[in-house]
Amino acid sequence: MHQPRPYGLHGQLTSDEDAAAVDALVRRLSNFKKAGELDSLKMVRALPGGGIAVALDMGGVLKVFVQQPEVPRPPDETFDGFAKPGIPMLFSAVVTKPIVFPGEGVEMRLTRTARRRVSNYAEDMPEGVAERQVLERFAIEYSNRHQEFRPNSSARIHTQYTKLRPSWYSGLMSAVVGIAGGYGKQELDKLPESKIERAKMLLPEKWRLKIEPELVGVRLPGYTGLPDKSGEIQYDYKFNESHGVMRDDKGKCWLIRISAAGVYAMPLPVIPATTTAAFREYIESVNDDEILWMLDQFGGMPSGEGFPPQSEGAFEAWRRAGAVIKVCDSGDFFQNMGYATTCGWAFNLSGTEGYNTCYEFGDDGLQVGKTYQLSIQLTAAEHEGRLRVPDSFRPDDPREAATLNSYLGSLFEALSGNSARNLAIKYKLRRVPVATILSRAGALRTSPQAEVDYWDNLEVEPIAAHSGHVTRVAQGTVWAPGNPKTFPQIKFPEPSAMGDGCISHDFGRLEGYPAPPMTTRCDTTMFVYYVGDDLKYVKYFRDGRTYDRNVEHNYDECMIVGAWEMTETVGSTGLLGNFYITDVDDRAAAAPTTTVTKTVGKDLGYDSAPYYGLDGWPAWCGSLWRNRYYSHTVNSVMSEGYSLNIAICIPFFERSAAIHAMKEATTGKTIRDSLAVYAVRDPNSYRYLTYDRVFAWFGCDSSGNMATATKFDPAPSEGRPFWLSGYSYYPGPCSDFADEGDWMGGLPQDVTHIAHKDPNNWEYGAAGGGPPTVKEYSRVTYGEHEESGHLTISLMDKLQTIHRKVPNPRYFLPSPDEFGNIFYMDAITNCSGSSVYGSVLEPDPEAPTYRKHWGYTRLADHKSAHHFMGVINE
């Protein structure tokens, strides 16, 4: 092992443990790069403190980018812990201009429903405000947890809608992110004086009076029920920390966080007023299908809030209060490395399970790819986590009631301010029995602060009994011989200061270990994702074993009519193609030289007239027979230098997609084509006789082995008539093809019209009708280097074909290349709403100026990777 090389550090290390982890990462990267003689290399590792380190060695420059999980925010002292009746305005739109100058607004196109909603469903404005809007409300920069997208320097504002797509997330989380992005900044008084900029939902008095009583006295479990004032997305999608949404046994949604600290859950933050029955009635009355979609999915409008922050002890305070629940540890998952920072956990759409992959170096110096499953059981929370003042807070005994009121009054006076700790204590006091509170009544008189500390440190039972575990469910070797220029290509999306794009994984081994045998086998999952509830995988495959392949064919002895194929190989056969995915497997067993011969046989029928002939001069008897004909068209293709290459690209912006590129090629071909006609003799034949004193007077046998005629009237004379006298059956190999039984139909029979049509011209025999007229041929052509292939993407419910031609060569080449260029490919889907839409950067073969796309939404122009905010139903 080498000492750590000097490197440039971008970001801050917050502990000695994090610094040691970065040094170990740099040492490992240096060893790996030297062993593989690599031009460039990237490694990703979660840090003990919850952040992530990305080590990049490119162009001789070694840099480490450190991303911390969050930056402390000042607490919101204005929130008192109680549910509020306010409802933010939701903008559903496609963003058309996300990069703006200071003071400018983000350009977008609103849905029809959003236009109605922004105008508060005014009857005199059936479509509401204008479709195109430019709003400073959405000029929101990336949050501190999404610094990977922020450019090094720019005079313009790169808003979070530039690269932070909802499709980076998985399952229901992607829909929540899309919705959260549709609220924008919430400090409305700081926005331009415009009804649209400062829009919020104003409920008619009738509905407000129905909703507000349901919220009185309700304390919320660790969230405010309102979007973040900054409008920044509060969730992460990365390897070191992933947020997801999962459902409990009653179908209620929970926010999940997976990190090195473990798996945590809390009730999904929603806007309280939108969970009431009266609000749903109102939304149904105004026919807002976008908000109804949210109510059906989440039981309310998600507020976009995350877990309480680690700063100021807020997270731990709410954990002790039971609202934030540790479900389980994360096992040894975070002791491994991620294939990319973007490879966070994948969740199914039903919110019941999750998967992820990672890798580590084994004792033999080879990479070990691992697959982990999050198996979780969530139970419904008491009161759905939201607590009212219970009747038990009002004891029947007047003295106890007075003592309780006095104690709580003094305690709440000591709990001045609305810090997270104080709000968690007040929430906790709603959950504990009254007897527990009364037991502390005497302690407050001696030390109010000590009593506050007591309640702060008290851990109560979680609001729900959750359980789960993170388990390694599969592992296998990830290795390839050679160097990065020849490695199999699987590319993962990676945003970085070096340039956004898809980076190739390095399949090399650690320095100082012996090379493994070339027969080392790999069949290892490297990437998992969900399309809906269907778990998909990308597997790396390698089998260095070869074998001598026998001739394979379906020929038979009587190959006459039908189709047959034979494959002959020269050289050892191996299984080619290094990747396969759930939806497509193009691997093939092939040898360097392969000859494939295809034969097609067609029935050409019988002679139009039978063959006949006397036994020779001067015999008076002869034979009558016929043939059945067929043709064989033969195509034989000998391919030399055959190769098959399969590459995988996980596109930028997408957690739930995989692009599959296939290319096959030959260095040369020899093609032989021929058409020939063949015949099979009918096993049914006949003998005939006549008499002529000059040409046919010598006696001979005219009987048949099946039947013989003995009486002929009139007796033949001077060569007339010719009598059919015997019927014979002599089957032979493959004669079934021509056998239709007795085709002349009885003995004796006058066949003069066949055997002696012209009385003036004596014939001892003739060819009858003969074979059909077919132009036979045989030719040889030679082909040069040929390539073919196709490009598909697993993005929607079914595998989608992008095109059926040779894919871009860069799919099969390392990224970055020798000049430092990074391959870029992206894809997006609409993640929230009923509109099904997806697109990929590849051009549409039928309309090359547009992206290849599937599904439909009115807002899409098929020219860019759209950022959809809110809910898209049209």
Image (cartoon, rainbow, N blue to C red):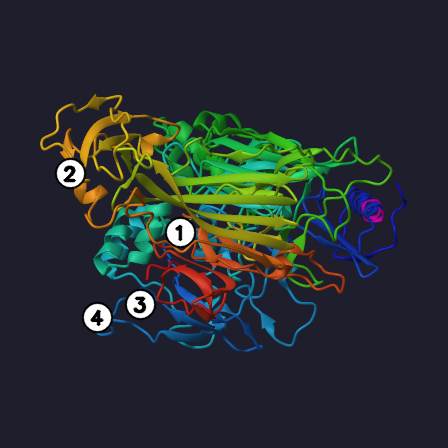
Residue 16 forms part of the magenta stretch: no
Residue 33 forms part of the magenta stretch: yes
CA distance for labels 2 and 3: 97 Å
Residue in view at x 77 percent, y 33 percent: 517
Residue 180: % across, % down: 46, 57
Amino acid of disc 4: Glu
CA distance for labels 3 and 1: 23 Å
Q: Which mark identifies residue 600? A: none
Residue 128: % across, % down: 29, 72
Depth-wise, is mark 4 or mark 2 nearer the camera? Answer: 2
Q: Residues within 10 Å of mark 1 (few under 14, many from 20)?
A: many
- Residue 623 in sight here: yes
Horizontal side of residue 173 vs 816, given as left or right: left
Residue in view at x 26 percent, y 41 percent: 610
- Residue receiving disc 2: 721
Give the secondary structure at mark 3: helix
Residue 585: % across, % down: 52, 42
Mark 4 / mark 1, whichever is N-terminal:
4
Amino acid of disc 1: Ile
Q: Residue furthest right?
A: 3
In front of the other: 186 or 127:
127
Q: Quadrant of residue 544?
A: top right
Amino acid of disc 3: Arg
Give the secondary structure at mark 2: loop
- Residue receiving disc 4: 123
Q: Residue furthest left?
A: 713
Compared to 526, does 211 lie above or below? below
CA distance for labels 4 and 2: 106 Å
